[in-house]
Image: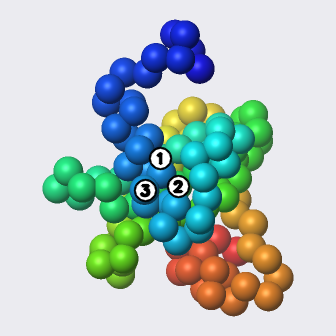
Amino acid sequence: MCGGGHLPSATRVAMSQMYSVLSRDFGYTMSDYSTFDVAALLRCDGQPTTAAVLDVYGADVAELFVVATRRGMRQKGNCRALVQQIARTLSDAGVRRLVVSVDEGDSESRAVWDKLGFQ
């Protein structure tokens, strides 16, 4: 970690909140997240609701690996809002494409990504 392993307290809190959202549904450990380039967190009324992790491969493409929304906060547009903000931020940084990977037989995930505009 930069700075001898010391993160600002706001960063530590955000990382902890991101982890709490993603670990519930996907069972990832904190060390699993160290392999990704970027993590994003959406808060509503100060509470973490949706989190995502992705890798950026230069200006050509970024790959969104996981997006999760806390139970009780789903079906309210939180995932869409976070994905749209990620796409805008990447575009502003010069990244041309945002892609997702879906396992061939995973129709549930495919339906979610299709609703968000991915093909």
Q: Nearer the viewer, mark 3 or mark 2?
A: 3
Q: Position of residue 47 (x, y in %)?
A: 24, 55
Left or right side of 12 for 37 = right
Mark 2, Cα crowd under 10 Å, few <14 / some 14-19 / many 20+, is many
Q: Quadrant of residue 35?
A: top right
Q: Residues within 10 Å of mark 3 (few under 14, many from 20)?
A: many
Amino acid bearing label 3: Ser
Q: Are marks 2 and 1 in contact (CB under 8 Å)?
A: yes
Q: Earlier in the sequence, mark 2 or mark 1?
A: 1
29 left or right of 70 in image: right
The quadrant of the rendering that contains the N terminus is top right
Element type where label 1 sits in the image: strand
In the image, what residue type sits under mark 1? Ala
Residue at (70%, 63%) from the top-left corner? 100
The image shows residue 75 at horizontal and vertical percentages of 35, 81
Residue 56 location (% of width, % of height): 70, 40
**Which is nearer the eye, 39 or 110?**
39
Q: Considering only order in the chain, which callout, 2 or 3, is on the residue closer to the N terminus?
A: 3
Name above or below for residue 19 compared with residue 2.
below
Spatial CA distance of label 3 from label 1 is: 13 Å
Give me the C-alpha separation between circle 3 and circle 2.
12 Å
Q: Secondary structure at mark 2?
A: strand
Q: Which residue is mark 2?
A: 52
User: Which residue is under mark 3?
Assistant: 20
The residue located at (67%, 48%) in the rendering is: 32
Residue 111 lies, with reference to residue 8, above or below; the image says below
Q: Rate crowding at label 1 as few (under 14), some (14 to 19) or many (20 or more) other CA atoms within 10 Å.
A: some
Give the residue displayed 48% in from the left and 51% down from the top. Answer: 19
Asked whether the residues under the numbered discs 3 and 2 touch, taking CB atoms below 8 Å apart as contact, a structural biologist would say no
Q: Which residue is mark 1?
A: 40
